[in-house]
Amino acid sequence: MEILKYYNQRRFLEFVPKVKDDLAAWRIVTVALTGHTGHNVMYIAKKITEMFSGREGIVFICNNQEILVLVNTGPESDPEQLGRKIGEKMPQYSCAAEAAGITPEGLFQIQIRLQDLGAEPATEQHAGSPLFNTRLNRKESVILIADDDMFMRSLLKKALDDRATIIEMGDANDVVTAYLDKLPDVVFLDIHMPHGSGMDVLGEILNYDETAYIIILSSDSIKDNVMNAKHTGAQGFLAKPFTQGKILDYFRKCPTVAARESKQAHVQK
């Protein structure tokens, strides 16, 4: 299932005619985040796509607290049971889900809702990514280090441990899930890891969050690797072995880190 964000409502509306062809088989699901947990809207959206893996459908993030889902569950699916099942599959207390059958009038209301959304003034929430804003409003910095080399992880942790909460991972498995769960300000990502390529992980994270701040780590500094990483969307490239100064330089350049440290310095004056 494709995940779309609030500024791409046109793509969602392009999907509507497909639903009209078989209304009885489709369900609309509204998911409202409660705000009682630290789970962000993209994390919940990804969990929804995992739940409906193999099903035809689309997930639309209306804002950082509301998700709209169109999914082909078949005409036998009971909407009330579907809504309850979704709620049970999500992290406890993170959201509430309500499912319903789809009518022509209901589809029209969806179109009106999304057209209104597109016409709303550019508030901070709509002008920038909800995920970026979540990081920006956090009191403490969070760093994710994904590298199979324990020594390199130790070097990075030593340089940054007193400046941020550190999350360590030794292989490519679950790096994307950890990213969406913790929303780190900075990701230091090894290009060569067990169970997957760092470049593939980079692309997948950016697919969910185009504002992610990711620094690629590698024991080789081949020009093609550097250019490929930057072309894919990495914010920088650190060739091993790296110095503490270079690590801190990239950390301070992170937009959310810089904004947070500037705000803290202003408060202390």
Image (spheres, rainbow, N blue to C red):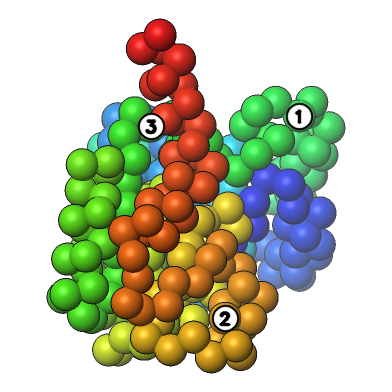
Q: Quadrant of the C terminus?
A: top left
Q: Nearer the viewer, mark 3 or mark 2?
A: 2
Which type of secondary structure does the marked residue at label 2 adopt?
helix
Assess disc 2: are there few (<14), some (14-19) or many (≥20) residues with their C-alpha within 10 Å of its C-alpha. some
Residue 191: quadrant of the picture: bottom left
Which of pointers 3 and 1 indicates the residue nearer the eye?
A: 3
Q: Amino acid at mark 2?
A: Val
Residue 260, compared with residue 203, is above or below; it is: above
Q: Residue at x 62, y 32 (%)?
A: 125
The residue that disc 2 covers is 226
Disc 3, disc 2: CB below 8 Å? no
Q: Position of residue 185 (x, y in %)?
A: 42, 48
Instruction: Say few, some or many: other residues with alpha carbon within 10 Å of mark 3 (under 14 / 14 to 19 / 20 or more).
Output: few
Spatial CA distance of label 3 from label 2 is 31 Å
Q: Does residue 23 appear anywhere in the picture?
A: yes
**Residue 122 got which mark?**
1
Residue in the foreground of this view, choosing between 54 and 156: 156
Residue ID at (51%, 47%): 253
Is 151 placed left or right of 101 in the picture? Answer: left
Query: Closer to the camera, 231 or 133?
Result: 231
Is 152 located above or below residue 225 in the figure? above
Q: Residue 267, located in which quarter of the rendered image?
A: top left
The answer to which of 65 and 73 lies nearer the viewer is 65
- Which secondary structure lies at badge 1? loop
Question: At label 1, which amino acid type do we have?
Answer: Ala
Q: Residue 239's x, y, as percent?
A: 42, 78
Dot label at residue 138 = 3
**C-alpha gap between disc 3 and disc 1:** 22 Å
